[in-house]
Amino acid sequence: MAKETILLIEDEKNIVELVKYNLEKERFRVLTATKGDEGLERARKETPKLIILDLMLPELDGIEICKILKQNYKTSHIPIIMLTAKGEEADRVLGLELGADDYVTKPFSPRELVARVRAVLRRAQGKPKERIFKVGTLELDTAKHTIKLKEKSLELTSKEYDLLKALLEAEGRVLSRDFLLDQIWGYDQSLEIETRTVDMHVSELRKKLRSEAHRIVTIKNVGYRLDPEA
């Protein structure tokens, strides 16, 4: 069976060696990059199963790498685990909002990191089968990870895509803000990710949906639903 490829983007040599050793011991194939721009290029070229991404990197920082990868439909599906220092909570929250799947705080246990890698990969593999959703002039293809509006490609961020997909999958049911935070942002109560995060993303999504924006209905004090009949 082919080994799953993990890309580690980290500039501290001792951490690279420690993580690489422990992942390879668990039969993963590990690629490494010590600079941000190099890591971004490897991610685009190799399309790994998962990326372990340090936030503080030379050339291009981890937040910018996360943003670029999650805004490109060819790489937005790749799970990202961030490596952060204790004092980087604001960056950690921003990374999660941009689409990162999990984080590990330095110093960390190699066993914990391997466990997080396996958990994130399980979640990624357990996602629903591909579908094509069509509502009005809007079409979302989960296999191709594309969105079209009036037959023309529509560019969404990773979170906007996940939000629209969740609303389409709900088939008219109301989704609470807390549910959306949990499903899309992997909401952790120890982090101060507020429900207004959902409102901000819905607002941006409506702008991009233009003529189909009216389908996203606000349910006061609860959340949102997408009306396929509107």
Image (cartoon, helix red, strand yellow):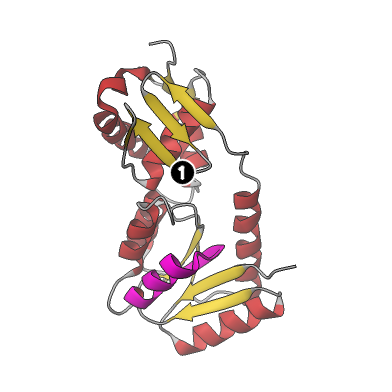
Q: Is residue 29 visible?
A: yes
Work out whether 12 lies above or below 119.
below
Answer left or right for 157 relative to 23.
left
Q: Specify the quadrant that holds the C terminus.
A: top left
Rendered location of residue 62, percent (x, y):
36, 67
Q: Residue at x 46, y 89 (%)?
A: 13
Rendered location of residue 52, percent (x, y):
50, 69
Query: Residue tagged by mark 1?
Result: 145
Q: Would residue 187 be counted in the magenta stretch? A: no
Q: Quadrant of residue 9?
A: bottom left
Work out whether 162 lies above or below 95.
above
Q: In this orientation, which residue lies closer to the viewer: 175 or 151?
A: 151
Q: In this orientation, which residue lies closer to the viewer: 67 or 198?
A: 67
Q: Specify the quadrant that holds the N terminus.
A: bottom right
Q: Is residue 220 visible?
A: no
Task: Judge the density around disc 1: few (<14), some (14-19), many (≥20) Cα neighbours within 10 Å.
Answer: some
Work out whether 150 lies above or below 187.
above
Answer left or right for 36 relative to 115.
left
Rendered location of residue 98, percent (x, y):
37, 52
Q: Residue at x 65, y 46 (%)?
A: 126
Looking at the rendering, the stretch of residues picked out in magenta corresponds to 37-52
Q: Residue at x 35, y 51 (%)?
A: 71
Q: Would residue 51 be counted in the magenta stretch? A: yes
Helix, strand or loop for the magenta stretch, by majority: helix
Which amino acid type is shown beneath numbered disc 1? His
Rendered location of residue 139, percent (x, y):
42, 29
